[in-house]
Image (tube, grey):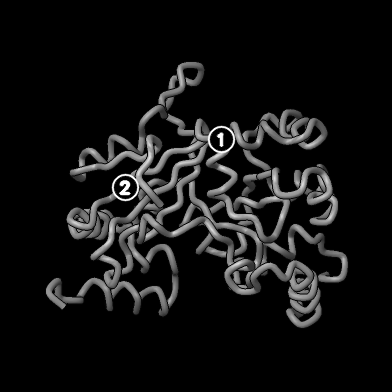
């Protein structure tokens, strides 16, 4: 992706921190509360492509079969009566290809994912910032009303279930042109520690980049030059923003130790 007017190239750790919290002061609250959702990628040229599209291409019919089979074999409690939205969220969490994209409320968690892959240190990283508050307010009136009635800026699973019953109904509202940001239930410590939430589009095969380019006032990208990645990485480690915390368990511990003790010149 070419550098655009929405891109901010930072040249130091302090500049990165400042840019991550730009426009976060809310006068009506007297507090710092950003409206941005953050997503970090190790390569600025990576697109915001969901895992279903990467796995299944344009074969949209496979989404139904993936979810149907997951419901059938997962042995989830009360899976027969579980809504498609809740099923989709659980499936995404455990690695099934879905139309969901992972985001975080935490700019430093996003910075972790922009710098965790040392094999990509020859490329500039990126942190996407999307104004999820304004995105959610662009929804059709019935869905937007559910959000307004709750006094919230973000949907929960229960609120989405009230607003739109299933994916088929969601897609029929405005195919490929609707985006919802929502919080998943706290399934485990990983979701809690990553301060995670998701975006979903009204099509399994649309790419969020393309939608955002039609709404350039809703996003910006903070570019982390490759020369800055080691410094950002070391300071995140010192702040305990690591795989050990974000992926609780032995696999996260092993990933952290593997990266932490990797020599810089290898």
Q: Residue at x 71, y 49 (%)?
A: 176
User: Where does the image place residue 215, in percent across and percent down from the top left?
Assistant: 56, 35
Secondary structure beneath label 1: loop
The image quarter containing residue 220 is top left
Contact (Cβ within 8 Å) of mark 1 with mark 2: no
List the single residue furthest toward the top. 28
The image quarter containing residue 14 is top left
In this rendering, would 129 be left or right of 61? left
User: Dividing the image into 4 quarters, which one contains the C terminus?
Assistant: bottom left
Q: Residue at x 49, y 21 (%)?
A: 29
List the single residue furthest toward the left. 265
List the single residue furthest toward the bottom. 73
Q: Is residue 66 visible?
A: yes
Compared to residue 185, the image places residue 251 above or below, namely: below
Badge 1 crowding class, 10 Å Cα cut-off, few under 14, some 14 to 19, many 20 or more, is: few
User: Where does the image place residue 130, in percent across and percent down from the top left?
Assistant: 50, 40
Q: Which residue is mark 2?
A: 223
Q: Is residue 238 visible?
A: no
In this rendering, would 68 be left or right of 181? right
Badge 2 crowding class, 10 Å Cα cut-off, few under 14, some 14 to 19, many 20 or more, is: many
Mark 1 or mark 2: whose residue is earlier in sequence? 1
Secondary structure beneath label 2: strand
Of residues 254 and 101, the one nearer the viewer is 101
User: Where does the image place residue 123, in percent across and percent down from the top left?
Assistant: 28, 61
Compared to residue 147, the image places residue 106 above or below, namely: below
Q: CA distance from mark 1 to mark 2?
A: 19 Å
Of residues 169 and 155, the one nearer the viewer is 169
Residue 204 image label: none
Q: Residue at x 63, y 73 (%)?
A: 96
| Nearest-to-viewer mark from 1 and 2 | 1
Q: Residue at x 40, y 37 (%)?
A: 6
Q: Which residue is mark 1?
A: 215
């Amino acid at each position: 992706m070419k550098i655009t007017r929405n891109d901010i190239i930072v040249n130091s750790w302090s500049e990165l921190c400042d840019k991550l919290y730009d426009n976060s002061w809310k006068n009506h609250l007297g507090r710092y509360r950003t409206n941005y959702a953050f997503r970090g990628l190790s390569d600025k040229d990576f697109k915001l492509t969901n895992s279903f599209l990467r796995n299944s291409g344009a074969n949209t019919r496979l989404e139904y079969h993936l979810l149907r089979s997951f419901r059938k074999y997962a042995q989830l409690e009360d899976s027969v009566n579980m809504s498609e939205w809740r099923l989709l969220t659980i499936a995404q969490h455990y690695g099934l290809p879905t139309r969901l994209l992972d985001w975080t409320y935490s700019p430093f968690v996003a910075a972790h994912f922009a710098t965790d892959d040392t094999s990509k240190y020859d490329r500039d990283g990126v942190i996407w910032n999307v104004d999820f508050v304004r995105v959610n307010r662009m929804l059709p009136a019935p869905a937007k009303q559910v959000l307004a009635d709750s006094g919230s800026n973000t949907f929960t699973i229960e609120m989405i279930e009230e607003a739109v019953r299933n994916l088929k109904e969601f897609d029929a509202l405005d195919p490929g042109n609707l985006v919802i940001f929502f919080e998943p239930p706290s399934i485990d410590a990983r979701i809690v520690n990553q301060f995670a939430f998701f975006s979903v589009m009204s099509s399994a095969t649309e790419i969020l980049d393309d939608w955002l380019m039609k709404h350039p006032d809703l996003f910006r990208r903070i570019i982390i030059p490759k020369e800055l990645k080691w410094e950002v990485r070391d300071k995140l480690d010192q702040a305990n923003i690591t795989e050990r915390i974000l992926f609780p368990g032995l696999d996260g511990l092993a990933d952290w130790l593997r990266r932490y003790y990797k020599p810089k010149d290898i």
